[in-house]
Amino acid sequence: MKTVLVVNHDQMGHGDASLGRKLLSAYLGRMNRDSGLESIVLYNAGVKLATTDSPLGACLHQLQEGGVDVLPCGTCVDHYGIKDRMVLDRVSNMDEIVATLQAADKVITL
């Protein structure tokens, strides 16, 4: 089953930002290709997670190295001016994001 995780914010849930980042870190730390996770789509503030100054950047890079396709939205990366701080090999685009979501058997949005 192809599972895609959508992360559209730089924390999990609403409320305390520090707690939200801690929860998201714990969640991502338990995900891997073996769990059925095929792709992670990052858009809006979620792209900030894939930067060198993010505590989750290394986790996302490790997931990518393990075979999970991590797709940060290029428009969002440009909007936030963070392209030079990305820890991932590439940025994506809306065509690829739409195709990934349409091909998924299950989409989880955090």
Image (cartoon, rainbow, N blue to C red):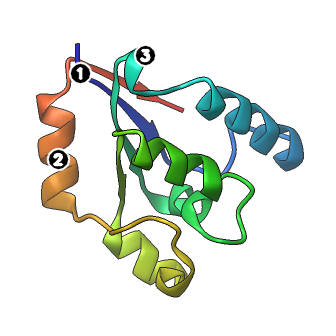
Among the two numbered marks 2 and 1 on one chain, the one whose residue lies closer to the N terminus = 1
**Which secondary structure, mark 1?**
loop
Circles 2 and 1 in contact, beta carbons < 8 Å:
no
Q: Which mark is residue 35?
A: 3
Mark 1 surroundings: few (<14), some (14-19) or many (≥20) residues within 10 A: some
Q: Going 52% across and 68% down the picture, which residue do you hit?
A: 87
The span from disc 3 to disc 1 (Cα, nearest Å) is 10 Å
Q: Can you give x and y, in whole percent of width and height, for residue 92 in the image?
A: 27, 64
Q: Which residue is mark 1?
A: 2
Please, which residue is most extreme toward the front here? 65
Side of 95 relative to 106 (left or right): left
Among the two numbered marks 3 and 1 on one chain, the one whose residue lies closer to the N terminus = 1
Circles 3 and 2 in contact, beta carbons < 8 Å:
no
Q: Quadrant of residue 23?
A: top right
The span from disc 2 to disc 1 (Cα, nearest Å) is 14 Å
Q: Can you give x and y, in whole percent of width and height, for residue 64 in the image?
A: 41, 48
Q: Which quarter shows the C terminus? A: top right
Q: Which residue is mark 2?
A: 98
The amino acid at mark 3 is: Ser
Q: Quadrant of residue 39?
A: top left
Among the two numbered marks 3 and 2 on one chain, the one whose residue lies closer to the N terminus = 3
